[in-house]
Image (cartoon, grey):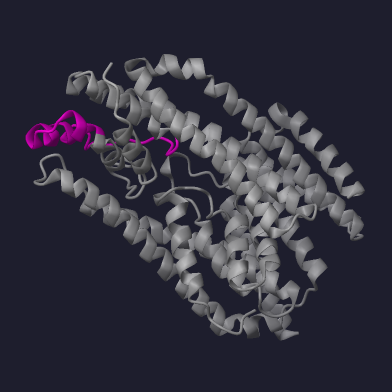
Amino acid sequence: MVDAFPLGLIALGAVLALDGTSVGQFMISRPLVAGVLAGWFLGDPLTGLWVGGLLELFYLPVVPAGGGRVPEAGPATVVAVYAGGFGSPGAGLALAVCLGLTWGGLGSLTQEKARSFYVSQLPNQDAPDLVRRIARVQWMGAAVEFIRGALLTAVGLMLVHATGAPTAAVWPLNLVQTVLLLVLAAMLPLGSLLATLGGLRARGGWMAGGLVAGGLLGALL
Amino acid sequence: MRVMPKGVRFQVFLRLFLVQACWNTRSMIGHGFAFALLPVLRWLHPDPVALRESLARHVMQFNAHPYLAALGIGAVARLEADGRPGEEIAHFKTAIRGPLGGLGDRLVWAGWLPAISLAALAAAILGASPAVSVILFLLVFNAGHLGLRAWSLSAGYDAGFDLAGRLKGARLDRKAEATGRMACFFLGLVVGLLFMRGVEAGLVAWLPLGVLFFLGGNLARRRTWRPAALATASLIAVLTIAGALL
């Protein structure tokens, strides 16, 4: 899976950065989707699904309400899926989730810098040629996001390419232990998601219904 | 009422997908709002001077949920078409931004999106292929997403100044309640499936810790992403270093 350095992944990361906030928001930048897309690029959609699925558990409570700074999942997931191909399955997953979370935080920092740049480019009401400049600043924003996403993804992929193999080689846990660790850690943000959705008191009944259904389906299937 | 030509409506609809292209802390989606409205203003004001004057009115701060911004854009398009004074339109925009933000956040970010994400995750845990999980998510989520944008633009233009009444009639707050409940159900479903997979793998002893973390996350409310991400990444780093040393 990691014989080559697919440049197509950089383009994918750039497109996902666009989808996250600037253009479309069709949610192809969600970790589950981004993970599978990156996995397809690398010829291993199942690893993409595993990595994307695990990251999705962490990113679910992230709500971009009011335009506040939020971690950026799209390019981070691309980097994570690439990392997922290194070492044993357990090592790959651990490396992937670690990168998926840290690169998401880095993504939001770069996004903040880009937004500060946009402020300096905004035309005010008295600006000459206002009609053309309004359109231009929108397209400029999309272009900057594309480039930012591409650079963020490229740097992440280069970092993984250089350090992925030796890092994955020393991971001490097997696949089951690794998945257990990651799913336990994901319970924190999932609990936080329940709070966002209304809390235990208001929504406990609905959650309980789902738990029972999940238990039954899990036992049967 | 002046009927917006289909071509103009289509251009506005397409521009809605770029309304956040240069989101920033000063005008937020203000410039995106003006950009999306531009085809309407061009239709109403063929004279370049009048066009520029009408556009300048909209170079101001504005924010709303990106999908529901169409309601505001449609309503303002109607006010412009009706020839309402600029000051009235500005006051109207200030009044609607809060509801369009809060309602959209509850309906989509804290309702529809987590519900469909969790449903797709549940399908994946139950053995659905990557293609099925992704297609399920994208088709279902975007059916709601695109339907909401298209309805918002039309409803906003039809309602104009009576946007509040139109929103009340559409009962979006009830729909937000319903999507929130749906999301909670699917959250329980995913957690239940994960726990069952843990039982099958012989990891019953760890389940209480999972419950503890879940309840801890619920108590901590919305402040857990950063600590959870930091703790997880740090733990992985520590274990990797331990693995290298041992």
Quarter of the image for residue B230 reads bottom right
Q: Is residue B150 above or below residue B209?
A: above
Residue in the image at 46% along x and 19% along y = B167
Image coordinates of residue B87 in percent, x first then y, are 19, 22
Residue in the image at 21% along x and 49% along y = A122
Q: Is residue B98 visible?
A: no
Q: Is residue A106 above or below residue A63?
A: below
Q: Choose between A1 and B105: the one closer to the eye.
A: A1
- Outermost residue, front side: B6
Q: Choose between A198 and A138: the one closer to the eye.
A: A138
In reply to whether residue B45 is colored magenta, the answer given is yes
Please give the range of residues in magenta: B40-67
Residue in the image at 73% along x and 58% along y = B129
In reply to whether residue B132 is colored magenta, the answer given is no
Q: Is residue A101 left or right of residue A147?
A: right
Image coordinates of residue B130 in percent, x first then y, are 69, 59
